[in-house]
Image (tube, grey):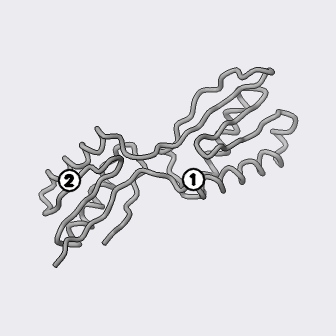
Amino acid sequence: MADSSFDVVAKVDRQEVDNAVNQARKELSQRFDFKNTGTSLAWSGEEVVILSKTDQRALAALDVFKDKLVKRSVSLKALTSSEPRPAGGGNYRVECSFLEGIPEDKAKALAKTLRQSGLKIQAQVQGDQLRVTGKSKNDLQQAIALLKERDEGLPLRFTNYR
């Protein structure tokens, strides 16, 4: 019988982020407290940039964006945002980026956790993801539960379950 496996990745669903950006844009354009503040969201596919005339409005727009991400089931663990910084023209800028891939040190720590768990599985670091293999699907399901329980500050997703 062939071994079963799954991949552990730390990625966000880009389509859901796009939907969250569009929903946040719409809410910012309709809300009274954002009228005449020049607040806008722009997404380049890599990062989201929030511009506003005041730093408080920029932070409020960031909260609206975070709320939309949560409603779209995108983990906020993947989001990294900067403090509001002056950006010419009297505006303030907040830059938000998303984590892509598991950093090597955290991948090694996750693999070590799996090895020490006593389950009959193997964990290999493959680039920016972790491949877990084992003969028993029950062991793999226990490994998923263990990784969900151990919080490394990563938005872990489990793919290619075979």
Residue at 71%, 49% (x, y): give it: 24
Q: Residues within 10 Å of mark 2 (few under 14, many from 20)?
A: many
Residue at 62%, 49% (x, y): give it: 67
Q: Which residue is mark 1?
A: 70
Q: Could you say where residue 97 lies in the image, as x and y percent from the top left?
A: 55, 39
What's the CA distance linking mark 2 and mark 1? Answer: 29 Å
Q: Which residue is mark 2?
A: 114
Q: Could you say where residue 98 lies in the image, as x and y percent from the top left?
A: 52, 43
Q: Nearer the viewer, residue 70 or 101?
A: 101
- Tell me if 1 is positioned left or right of 38 in this view: left
Dot 2 and dot 1 residues touching (CB under 8 Å): no
- Tell me if 2 is positioned left or right of 48 in this view: left
Q: Could you say where residue 11 lies in the image, as x and y percent from the top left?
A: 46, 51
Q: Kindly indicate the quadrant of the structure image that contains residue 93.
A: top right
- Tell me if 11 is positioned left or right of 5 in this view: right
Number of the front mark, 2 or 1: 2
Give the secondary structure at mark 1.
helix
Q: Residues within 10 Å of mark 1 (few under 14, many from 20)?
A: few
